[in-house]
Structures are given as structure tokens and as C-alpha cells.
Image: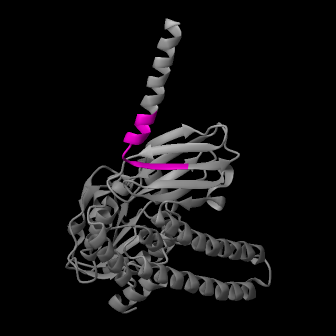
Amino acid sequence: MRKITIMIFLISLILYGCEQEVEQHKGFTVSGKLENSAGKLITLNKMTKNSLSLIDSIFINNKGEFVLKGESKGPEFYVLRTAAIDYITLIIGSTDKIKITGFYDKLLDTYTIEGSEDSKLIKEVDMVFRKNKSIIDSLGRIYQKAFDTDKKDSVKAEIDKVFIKVMKEQKAYSIDFVEKNKTSLASLVALSQGFARNSTIFNLDEDMKYFKMVDNGLMKTLPNSSDAKAFHEFLLKYEKRIKIGSNVPEISLSTPEGETLSLSSLRGNYILLDFWASWCKPCRVENPNLVLNYSKYRRKGFSIYQVSLDKEKEAWVEGIKKDRLSKWHHVSDLKFWNSAAAKEYGVQSIPASFLLDPEGKVVAVNLRGEQLGAKLKEIYGY
């Protein structure tokens, strides 16, 4: 009898302890019920600057139910991920009680959410974007099928019309969304979306007023948010970026031969400062244009100083060799996106270039294809 009494006492302590843990949890919870999920793993990760940080994880019970917990200083970005590599983005406040339903294997396509208006906004903006992205992708497939036929040009003309229409509709929706939700972190998602890598719907130069609109809204309502502060600092740096008329900072890096070469040592004529990498397909596509223009104007003193964002020396050197770039100057610190020069020049995507005059001032930025040839013709007269 005494043993039974002790067992009941211990069980009550365990149950009471569990109860107390739930009651005393002062952070947020993300709970829900997912179909076809029994025994499967689900994780909650916090978005940091360069990665995801695991906050909580659990194997879903036999009823398809789960509860994840964490603590937040305020609205922050999180990712709820299944083992099926399906995920949704959430904005979670410090005391939010979020409830999610849907299908485990198709979470992004099926989920519903309660308890977070910001997360609902993310779902809304993502659904519109994904619908238009699907149309853009289908246009690409149609063009590929017609590429080797005599209908290629007519098909392309029709595709271009649809593409422009979809882009305008997406831009109009995104502007309306940002204007209505400028105090929500969800607007950062709208501002960053793009149908192609390194190509966003909003252009920082042309659409700066929308970036500032969101920045002002977030700084007023969420001044302590790490995401809002990071966005604010990014805009400040961007506005101080190197542009036409700027004197450029010095670059002094190693050549493939291990010697140090400074940018300033080449002054006295026009220099194209070009950021690239062997792994960057658009850079490799642009390289023949650089070769063409260098061959045409090198006797006039035109020079190219190419900074690589490669990680491996072998890949960098092989890229130089394959693209026949060896006649001009190459440097790198082999630090990928942590390249000191890229950071100093505010390079966010590559290829990126700055055409410098003989005194080292910027006369043009990001000239591509025929634009570079046209500018050099204007400078050299032929």
C-alpha cells in the first residue's frame, strides 16, 4: 500500500511539473495538427543573417499534433520545416500563440494559420508571388520548346507580352501591399522577391521611396527589431555606396602568381574594375564582351582590373584560362562573398563593374554588353 501511495505521489509530481512548465512558459508557441504526419519530425528555425538557427523540434504524435516553443524579443522571422524539405516562413512575436493546420508533405500549399497577423500577410504575399512565378516558369518552358523551330521569333514576341503583363501586375500588387503594410516585417518579404536570381521586382535606385517607406514604418513601430535594424543599416550603407562621380577606395590584393597588385597603380588611363567569379554564369557570359573591348582599346591604354569572388584558386585560374582573360589584371582574396573589396564597394551581386577615369573617379556603373562598347567609343572616339 505504501509503495502504491508513493507511486501516485511521484506521478502527481510529474504531472504537476508538466502542468507548471506549460503555465510558466512565457514565450511563444507554434502548435498545430498536420495530416499524414504521425511520428514525423518538424522543426522550428530562426532566421539569422547568414543561416538558420534551430529553436525547437519534435516528432509529431499519433494524432498529428505538435507543440513547439521558443522565446523572442519581438517580431522575428522563423521557418517551420518538415522532413519532406517543405517549409513556411513565419513572423513570430514574443507571446504569440500560433496554430497551424495542413498536410505534412505539402505544407506550403495547404497550410492555414491563426494567431499571427504578420504570418498571414507573408502567406498572402507569397501566394500571389508563387502564382505569377508559375506563369513565368511556364513561359520559359514554352520558349524552350519553340527555340529550334521557325516559330521561335513569333513565340518569343507573344511570350514577351505576357511576361511584361505579369511583371506589371506583380509590381502593382507588391506596391499596394507595401503601402498598406509598411509597419509589418512582411513588407521586407515583398521588397525582396524576384523571379530570377539577383533580379528583384523592386529596384533599389528606381523604387527607393518604397524601401524608405518601409524603413520609416518599421523604425517607428519596431525600433528594437533586429530585422528592422538590419534593414535600416543596409539602406544607410546603400545610400553611401560608390556611384558616378565617386572617388573609389583602394584595392590591394594578390594576383594568381602571389604578388600584390593595387588598383591605384594602374591610374593614368581608363580602367574597368570588374567583380566576377568562375562559378558565376552571367559573369562568364559577359567575359567575351570584355575580351572584345579590351582588344579594341588596350593600345589606347584601356585596362581591366578584375576582382574574383572565387573560393578556390584552381577554379579561379581555370576560369581565367578558359575565358581567355589572361591579358589583363586579376586579383582575389578567395573569400567568396566575404571578399573585403566586394564589401567595400557595396557589391551585392555579380557581375558588377565600375568604369574609372584616369584620376580614379567613377564615370559609369555596371555597363553590360553593347553599353560598355558604346561608352568606350564615346571616350576614345572610335
- Towards the viewer: 142 or 9: 9
Q: Quadrant of the C terminus?
A: bottom left
Q: Is residue 287 magenta?
A: no
| Image x and y of residue 59, in percent | 58, 37
Q: Which residues are magenta?
A: 19-31
Q: Is residue 274 left or right of residue 240?
A: right
Res 224 → quadrant: bottom left
- Look at the picture and state if 231 lies above or below 359: above
Q: Residue at x 66, y 71 (%)?
A: 134
Q: Is residue 23 magenta?
A: yes
| Image x and y of residue 301, in percent | 30, 78
Res 262 → quadrant: bottom left
- Look at the picture and state if 352 lies above or below 176: above
Q: Is residue 165 left or right of residue 222?
A: right
- Towards the viewer: 360 or 37: 37
| Image x and y of residue 177, in percent | 48, 79
Q: Is residue 317 left or right of residue 358?
A: right
Q: Residue at x 71, y 45 (%)?
A: 36
Q: Residue at x 44, y 68 (%)?
A: 186
Q: Residue at x 28, y 58 (%)?
A: 340
- Towards the viewer: 150 or 254: 150
